[in-house]
Image: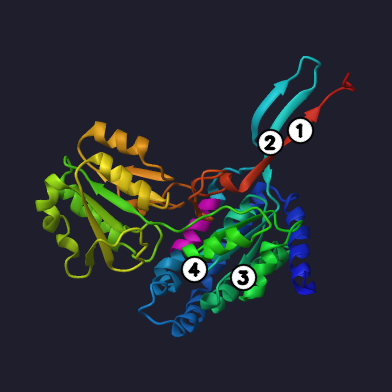
């Protein structure tokens, strides 16, 4: 491993161990100080973000994810304060037992140690990952994309300034260079990176999974469907479909494909009326995460065909059914294989903050380990504590 990256990773590991000595009260206070600093430095953050935006084509689907606004900065600070208010995920006894020989067993929650995150043009991720990792006692190593370089550097400077004021080792938040070499170094940092989480496109996630020698949790890529059932309510359907598609088209929980029961095909124009002026509709293009004002439409003969279609083209992220028939809704929720399955609710709610997690470090689409929005609990592991009075094994 290159000496530069070895220094980055070893520094993060040392700083992570030091976090074990911080009380939850201290961590909460520091998180609130960082949130204050974010709001206080709004103009600096926007200026840095402007430099990034100037290098990106406004028609790029990632432009919206890259862009920061005063409202988004305020939301970032608010989410950080919310994380500070949440109960600590550490030291929780998740299982306990006393053996017949008197040995006492406790399984308790602990930090992973060092969490590496690879992400693209999403400067909000820098703040979210820091808040969740710091609260849960994990050091974080961040590898952002070059598109958000100035925004990420500004964010880490603000965080580091507060940490230095508080006497905390600033290497508990390490920003790597925005290079392919840095990604490769993180993915092979065995003994330094305890968990790697990619956030971004399918291409990025596949690259991390295929090349990592450290443990990986897959997150992010979403091919999202909503099924309008034969018993769906048109007024609800209009609101739900429009919100799922147009609230923010570039995010992973945005609607990509509307599935409609053939008995309601005549209602499609009415269902899509709120979007006619800005959304392009497609028949026959399926399995695509649009990240734009495009929407696929599929007509099916039954709820079973809808479920089979989702099984074929979905990514295991978020799926929704619109219906007034409870039996149909329960069937859909039971049989659709995804991290989040909704009934009469838009998929736009798949978000850590919306789920009450304060923020999210990603949305896991895998089944082993965490699934869905990942908050504090999902970035802890556990260890066994065993106590006795000198018992020996025969």
Labels 3 & 1 near each other (Cβ < 8 A): no
- Choose the circle earlier in sequence order: 1 or 4: 4
CA distance for labels 1 and 2: 7 Å
Residue density around tag 4, few if under 14, some if 14–19, many if 20 or more, within 10 Å: many
Labels 1 & 2 near each other (Cβ < 8 A): yes
- The mark tally for this picture is 4
Residue at the location (25% across, 47% down)? 227
The answer to whether residue 247 is above or below residue 277 is above
- Choose the circle earlier in sequence order: 1 or 2: 2
Q: Nearer the viewer, residue 300 or 79?
A: 300
Q: Which residues are magenta?
A: 75-83
SS category of the residue bearing label 3: helix
Residue density around tag 3, few if under 14, some if 14–19, many if 20 or more, within 10 Å: some
Q: How far from the left and from the top, in percent, is residue 221? A: 45, 59
- Choose the circle earlier in sequence order: 3 or 1: 3
- Quadrant hosting residue 93: top right
Find disc 2 in the rendering and name its residue: 108
Say which mark, if any, is on residue 270. none
SS category of the residue bearing label 1: strand
Instruction: Assign the C terminus to one quadrant of the image.
Output: top right
Residue at the location (31% across, 43% down)? 307
- Choose the circle earlier in sequence order: 2 or 4: 2
Q: Residue furthest left?
A: 266
Q: Nearer the viewer, residue 346 or 132?
A: 346
Q: How far from the left and from the top, in percent, is residue 71? A: 40, 67
Residue at the location (24% across, 33% down)? 326
Say which mark, if any, is on residue 385. 1
Find disc 4 in the rendering and name its residue: 122
Q: How far from the left and from the top, in percent, is residue 95? A: 65, 28
SS category of the residue bearing label 4: loop
The answer to whether residue 100 is above or below residue 87 is above
């Amino acid at each position: 491993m290159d000496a530069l990256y070895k220094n980055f990773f070893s520094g993060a590991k040392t700083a992570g161990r030091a976090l074990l000595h911080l009380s939850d009260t201290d961590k909460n206070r520091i998180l609130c100080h960082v949130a204050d600093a974010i709001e206080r430095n709004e103009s600096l953050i926007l200026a840095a973000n402007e430099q990034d935006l100037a290098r990106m084509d406004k028609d790029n689907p990632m432009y919206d994810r890259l862009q920061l606004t005063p409202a988004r900065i305020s939301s970032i600070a608010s989410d950080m304060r919310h994380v500070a208010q949440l109960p600590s995920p550490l030291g929780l006894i998740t299982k306990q037992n006393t053996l017949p020989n008197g040995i006492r067993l406790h399984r308790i929650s602990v930090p992973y140690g060092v969490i590496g995150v690879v992400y693209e043009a999403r400067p909000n991720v820098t703040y979210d990952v820091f808040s969740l990792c710091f609260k849960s006692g994990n050091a974080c190593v961040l590898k952002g994309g070059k598109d958000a370089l100035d925004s990420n550097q500004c964010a880490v400077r603000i965080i580091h300034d507060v940490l230095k004021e508080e006497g905390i080792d600033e290497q508990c938040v390490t920003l790597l260079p925005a290079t392919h070499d840095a990604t490769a170094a993180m993915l092979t940092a065995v003994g330094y990176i305890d968990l790697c989480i990619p956030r971004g496109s399918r291409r990025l996630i596949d690259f991390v999974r295929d090349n990592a020698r450290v443990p990986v949790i897959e997150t992010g890529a979403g091919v999202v469907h909503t099924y309008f059932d034969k018993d769906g309510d048109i007024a609800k359907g209009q609101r739900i479909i429009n919100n799922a598609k147009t609230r923010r088209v570039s995010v992973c929980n945005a609607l990509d494909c509307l599935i409609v029961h053939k008995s309601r095909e005549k209602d499609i124009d009415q269902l899509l009326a709120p979007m006619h002026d800005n959304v392009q509709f497609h028949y026959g293009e399926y399995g695509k995460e649009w990240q734009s004002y495009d929407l696929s439409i599929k007509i099916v003969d039954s709820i079973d065909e809808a479920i089979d279609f989702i099984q074929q083209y979905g990514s295991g992220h978020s799926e929704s059914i619109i219906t007034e028939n409870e039996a149909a809704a329960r069937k859909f929720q039971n049989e659709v294989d995804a991290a989040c399955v909704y009934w009469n609710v838009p998929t736009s709610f798949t978000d850590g903050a919306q789920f009450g997690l304060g923020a999210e470090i990603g949305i896991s689409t895998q089944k082993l380990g965490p699934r869905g929005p990942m908050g504090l609990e999902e970035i802890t592991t556990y260890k066994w504590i065993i106590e006795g009075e000198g018992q020996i094994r025969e």
